Image (spheres, rainbow, N blue to C red):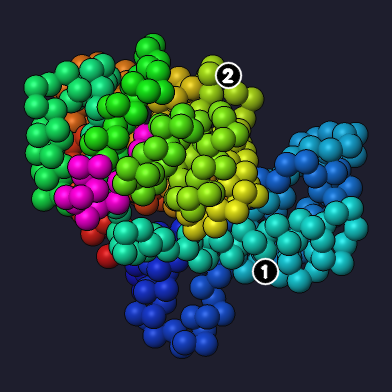
């Protein structure tokens, strides 16, 4: 008898569920076995050597594994890191026993339980301007409108005649193409940018926001890291604050967002691309931004995270962040990805800004497969099509 063997997409629980259902597994069996078909790898930092070794023994007893460095395994180091590997079912069994163990493992059990719940439930929905955004149902598109003379992408509208007319035309085109948000910026943040004054930035963006708020139903985001600009922008009609410093540059920014109960996009940023643990540091920065916002009274569902492609990272680091974007799902917030026309695409393809549409499309498709919920782009029509096609594949 000749057997027929094929692989299934092991880390796609819905695929495993459909295949088990197709071969006639009972509903009770589906509930029992689905957790065995999803493999999770979790890195734990700041764990003591005794706790790590107990964790390893407990996970081995469940059929999983915990990787430790030699110094930790032989108790020659007081504290370090551990990498837990196992199925979701093995994690659940581990959590039944871990709370009774010493060395802080009860607290680790609570953290692991929260992580599993976060991954199962996904980010909570958000309502803006009477529009409900249900993350994971489809990918949302944010169209970029630059009110600057020096945008890196060459699409700044400030220097053009009849600027407001051009803004309205661009916004109308974005709306017709399928945009879900409009992001308005009056300060270029390209490499080597010249900072403009607060008053100049307000002069650029406030008339635009006032006009768009009256004419378009889309939620409006203001791209600024200056608290005074953010406050004035909210009063002028902005619905969200998009801060490239993740609320950590000026303490007034989080106070303004919390007072207005305005949703925020918090981006990872750094002045130099020097990292010991790239993804760990990106995640830690974003977690700090989330904690800061929540501590000031902003609900978690109003916080969107952005890994900051093109900010404080080398081209190689940008590619790594994009490839490992799904690691940020653990933070429990919707993920915005902004790769549009950026220098990492030019670096890989050796192309000028105006020829980076295909490269942008590749990053958008990969970003969506890695968990991005919002794509921030210049070429809305083309990227809406890319997003819809990618959604059709991964959500089929």
> Which sits in the foreground, 23 or 152?
152
Which quadrant holds residue 150?
top left
Q: Where, quadrant-wise, is the N terminus in this rendering?
A: bottom left
Q: Is residue 261 visible?
A: yes
Disc on res. 92: 1
Distance of label 2 from label 1 (alpha carbons)? 37 Å
Residue at the image point whose x is 71% and y is 70% from the top: 93
Residue at the image point whose x is 57% and y is 30% from the top: 250
Residue at the image point whose x is 41% and y is 50% from the top: 371
Which quadrant holds residue 138?
bottom left
Is 113 situated left or right of 243 in this image? Answer: right
> Which residue carries the number 2 mark?
274
Label 1: how many Cα within 10 Å (few below 14, some 14–19, many 20+): some
SS under mark 2: loop
Q: Position of residue 100 (x, y in %)?
A: 87, 67
Looking at the image, is 175 positioned above or below residue 246?
below
Query: Which span is picked out in magenta?
Result: 210-223
Looking at the image, is 78 positioned above or below residue 215?
above
Residue at the image point whose x is 46% and y is 45% from the top: 264
Is 257 situated left or right of 388 in this image? Answer: right
The earlier-in-sequence mark between 2 and 1 is: 1
Q: Position of residue 355 (x, y in %)?
A: 16, 23
Q: Where, quadrant-wise, is the C terminus in this rendering?
A: bottom left
Label 2: how many Cα within 10 Å (few below 14, some 14–19, many 20+): few
Does 213 appear in magenta? yes
Which quadrant holds residue 211?
top left
SS under mark 1: helix
């Amino acid at each position: 008898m000749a057997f027929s063997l094929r692989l299934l997409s092991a880390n796609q629980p819905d695929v495993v569920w459909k295949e088990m259902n197709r071969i006639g597994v009972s509903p009770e069996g589906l509930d029992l076995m689905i957790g065995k078909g999803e493999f999770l790898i979790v890195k734990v930092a700041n764990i003591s050597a005794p706790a790590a070794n107990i964790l390893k023994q407990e996970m081995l007893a469940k059929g999983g594994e915990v990787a430790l460095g030699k110094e930790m395994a032989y108790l020659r180091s007081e504290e370090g890191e551990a990498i837990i590997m196992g199925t979701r079912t093995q994690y659940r069994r581990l959590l039944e026993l871990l709370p009774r163990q010493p060395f802080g493992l009860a607290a680790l059990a609570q953290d692991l339980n929260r992580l599993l719940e976060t991954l199962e439930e996904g980010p909570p929905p958000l309502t803006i301007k009477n529009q409900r955004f249900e993350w994971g149902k489809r990918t949302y598109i944010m169209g970029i409108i630059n009110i600057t003379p020096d945008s890196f992408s060459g699409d700044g509208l400030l220097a053009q005649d009849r600027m407001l007319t051009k803004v309205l035309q661009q916004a109308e085109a974005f709306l017709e193409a399928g945009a879900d948000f409009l992001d308005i910026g009056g300060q270029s943040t390209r490499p080597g940018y010249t900072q403009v004054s607060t008053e100049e930035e307000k002069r650029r963006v406030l008339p635009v926001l006032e006009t768009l708020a009256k004419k378009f139903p889309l939620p409006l985001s203001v791209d600024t890291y200056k608290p005074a600009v953010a406050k004035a922008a909210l009063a002028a009609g902005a619905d969200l604050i998009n801060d490239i410093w993740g609320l950590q540059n000026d303490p007034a920014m989080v106070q303004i967002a919390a007072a207005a109960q305005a949703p925020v996009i918090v981006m990872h940023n750094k002045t130099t691309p020097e990292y010991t643990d790239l993804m760990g540091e990106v995640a830690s920065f974003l977690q700090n931004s989330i904690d800061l916002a929540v501590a000031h009274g902003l609900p978690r569902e109003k916080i969107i995270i952005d890994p900051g492609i093109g900010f404080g990272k080398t081209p190689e680091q940008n590619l790594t962040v994009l490839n490992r974007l799904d690691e940020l799902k653990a933070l429990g917030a919707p993920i915005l990805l902004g790769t549009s026309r950026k220098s990492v695409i030019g670096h890989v393809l050796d192309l000028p800004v105006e020829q980076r549409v295909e490269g942008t499309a590749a990053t958008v498709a990969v970003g969506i497969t890695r968990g991005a919920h919002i794509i921030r782009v210049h070429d809305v029509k083309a990227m809406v099509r890319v997003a819809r096609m990618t959604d059709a594949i991964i959500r089929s």
